[in-house]
Image: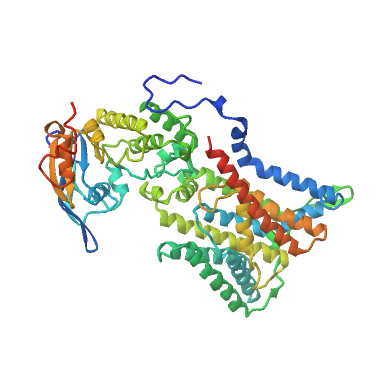
């Protein structure tokens, strides 16, 4: 360590040796702790169901089932980074999905139908953003609660409240296609396209949030909106983009779910906004904004998927799943509270 | 643009007849202010006298309702802090305006991030490495020592945060730095260090406007002091020609010396 000049104006930094090991490990656990949790969960499940859990079929199922939540969660994460919330993503998912299914049934060519789901999602997100900034809604909760009802109503309205099934293969590609990788011990190994897509999306969001000016400003707005404003950052414009991104991801989730189920049903995604919020919180983001990482959110989504899968494999009722997820949300935040105590005590 | 440039015969920044209304409330009435190149001007006044409002007019946060601002000889009008900043007028806010969740380097360059352009400028990537290197050099240049510029601002002491906020204000060729109560929230042992930093800015030729309630601060760093009272100019003087008692009297709205309240002027 370099010597500090005599005329140093501020306190010389404390020596690294004085910081106890437990405190120096905090950043490590902040970043990678969630991966350890996932590894432990996998071990437990493997021990309980050694034949099924690690089968390729089960693993690809987990990825297929969590993909839609993964899309909603990463969009929700960007919103929560700004200390906001988007309650409408489940309904917007349904709106995108029904726009897709209805337009397909009406004979719209598939490339257009396919694009309509994310476009509807973006439109809904943009309206959310305008409402929160320009209409000066007192809290994003209000605007997106309104959108929750409006998008659900619209999804029912355009479909007459009935499901549409049967979609062309290109539209289903993202949600249901698999890539044949080869054979292993006599079973065909197929990689779901949506798995690769999820990885790609999370990678793009990691670049967006960690390495672009826009991303760093999203963090700054979450940390101190006043500081962001006086620094010349256009906070309103940034927020509108953030909510538009979140809506866009809900539209993508609608496209994935339509592909997986080969249909559109107007009550799709009911309650999924809460699952997305849960994944973001379990993934270590702060509800007060400015804190959390893309890798953590990926972990949060995986944990939610693993819990459901593990309990299903062991024939535990879905009611227990709800109880467990609820308990884990509380536990995850409590651990964060303890961690912060430890971090500020020195 | 203007041939006069920095001419010591003219103020660097001049405010004439500034009025500011918030609805029916008159916060400032016909306020004048001159700031000369390389000068530290203290602005005093009781709570609600209009000091902070005047500073926000000068820094572009609240445009004035009436009156003119003249910067470097030409009239200017700011509709946002960014426009003032583009001319080199920076403000250090009382609540510091730093994002605690981000590191020192990111805070220093918030809103003016160093970027690497990719794909022919279509994609602006935040240049973490250059930000960290420049922030480090900048802080070393100002003799501000922190453990690391990658440290989060929320981990810093009040004095360190204030130092970062001041460093941030002069990271881009500032000519004027406006500070609202820079020592109000500090531990006593940190006050002197921040005041020395302000003197350092002055030695670098930067003009400073400082709002303070603390006579010690005013008499340590200022060249001149002006007092506002109920939103109007009340009095002003070069520091050498006044005393603490007199300045405290101005704050209370009297031009008689308040000998009982204060010590006499310092050396």
| Residue nearest the observer in this picture, A103 or B258 | B258
Q: Is residue A281 above or below residue B267?
A: below
- Residue at 17 percent of width and 49 percent of height: B229
Tell me if I can see residue B235 in this picture. Answer: yes
- Residue at 74 percent of width and 53 percent of height: A306
- List the single residue furthest toward the front: B260
| Residue nearest the observer in this picture, A143 or B196 | B196
Question: In this rendering, would B248 be left or right of A272?
Answer: left
Question: In this rendering, would A307 be left or right of B256?
Answer: right
Q: Position of residue A278 (x, y in %)?
A: 63, 57
- List the single residue furthest toward the left: B256
| Residue nearest the observer in this picture, B86 or B45 | B45
Tell me if I can see residue B4 in this picture. Answer: no
What's the coloring here?
rainbow
Q: Is residue B145 above or below residue A296?
A: above
- Residue at 69 percent of width and 52 percent of height: A302
Number of numbered discs = 0
Q: Is residue B214 above or below residue A160?
A: above
- Residue at 56 percent of width and 42 percent of height: A341
Q: Position of residue A289 (x, y in %)?
A: 51, 51
Q: Position of residue A204 (x, y in %)?
A: 58, 48
Q: Is residue A5 above or below residue B177?
A: above
* Picture quadrant of residue B96: top left
- List the single residue furthest toward the right: A186
* Picture quadrant of residue B133: top left
């Amino acid at each position: 360590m370099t010597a500090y000049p005599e005329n140093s104006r501020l306190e010389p930094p404390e020596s690294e040796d004085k910081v106890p090991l437990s405190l120096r490990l905090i950043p490590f656990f902040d970043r990678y702790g969630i991966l350890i949790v996932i590894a432990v969960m996998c071990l437990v499940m493997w021990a309980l169901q050694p034949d099924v859990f690690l089968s390729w079929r089960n693993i690809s199922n987990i990825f297929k089932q969590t993909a839609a939540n993964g899309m909603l969660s990463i969009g929700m994460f960007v919103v929560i980074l700004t200390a906001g919330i988007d309650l409408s993503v489940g309904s917007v998912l349904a709106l995108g999905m029904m726009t897709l299914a209805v337009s397909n049934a009406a004979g719209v060519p598939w490339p257009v139908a396919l694009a309509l789901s994310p476009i509807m999602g973006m439109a809904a997100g943009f309206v959310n953003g305008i409402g929160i900034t320009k209409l000066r809604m007192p809290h994003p909760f209000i605007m997106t609660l309104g959108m929750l009802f409006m998008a659900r109503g619209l999804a029912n309205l355009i479909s007459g409240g009935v499901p549409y099934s049967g979609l062309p293969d290109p539209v289903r590609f993202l949600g249901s296609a698999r890539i044949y990788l080869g054979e292993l011990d006599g079973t065909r190994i197929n990689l779901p396209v949506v798995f690769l897509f999820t990885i790609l999306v999370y990678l793009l969001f990691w670049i967006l949030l960690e390495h672009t000016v826009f991303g760093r400003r999203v963090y700054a707005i979450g940390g101190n909106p006043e500081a962001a404003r006086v620094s010349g950052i256009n906070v309103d414009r940034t927020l509108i983009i953030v909510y538009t991104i979140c809506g866009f991801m809900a539209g993508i989730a609608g496209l994935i779910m339509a592909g997986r189920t080969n249909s559109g049903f107007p009550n799709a995604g009911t309650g999924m906004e809460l699952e997305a919020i849960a994944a973001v919180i379990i993934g270590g983001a702060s509800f007060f904004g400015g804190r959390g990482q893309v890798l953590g959110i990926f972990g949060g989504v995986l944990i939610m998927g693993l819990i459901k899968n593990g309990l299903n494999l062991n024939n535990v009722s879905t009611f227990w799943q709800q109880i467990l997820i609820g308990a884990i949300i509380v536990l995850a935040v409590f651990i964060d509270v303890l961690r912060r105590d430890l971090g500020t005590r020195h | 643009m203007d041939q006069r440039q920095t001419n010591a015969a003219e103020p660097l920044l001049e405010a004439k007849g500034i009025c500011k209304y918030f609805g029916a409330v008159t916060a400032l009435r016909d306020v004048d202010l001159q700031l000369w190149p390389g000068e530290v001007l203290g602005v005093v006044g009781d709570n609600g006298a209009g000091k902070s409002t005047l500073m926000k007019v000068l820094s572009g946060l609240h445009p004035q309702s009436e009156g003119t601002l003249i910067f470097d000889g030409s009239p200017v009008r700011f509709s946002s802090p960014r426009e003032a900043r583009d001319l080199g007028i920076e403000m250090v806010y009382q609540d510091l305006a730093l994002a605690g969740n981000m590191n020192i380097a990111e805070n220093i360059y918030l809103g003016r991030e160093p970027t690497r352009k990719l794909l022919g400028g279509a994609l602006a990537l935040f240049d973490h490495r250059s930000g960290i290197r420049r922030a480090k050099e900048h802080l070393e240049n100002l003799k501000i020592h922190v453990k690391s510029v990658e440290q989060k601002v929320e981990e810093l002491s009040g004095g360190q945060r204030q130092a970062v906020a001041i460093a941030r204000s002069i990271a881009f060729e500032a000519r004027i730095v406006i500070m609202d109560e820079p020592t109000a929230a500090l531990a006593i042992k940190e006050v002197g260090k921040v005041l020395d930093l302000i003197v350092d800015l002055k030695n670098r030729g930067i003009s400073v406007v400082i709002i303070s309630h603390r006579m010690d601060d005013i008499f340590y760093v200022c060249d001149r002091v002006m007092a506002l009272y109920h939103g109007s100019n009340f009095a002003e003087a070069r520091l050498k020609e006044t005393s603490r008692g007199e300045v405290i009297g101005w704050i209370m709205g009297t031009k008689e010396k308040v000998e009982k309240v204060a010590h006499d002027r310092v050396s």
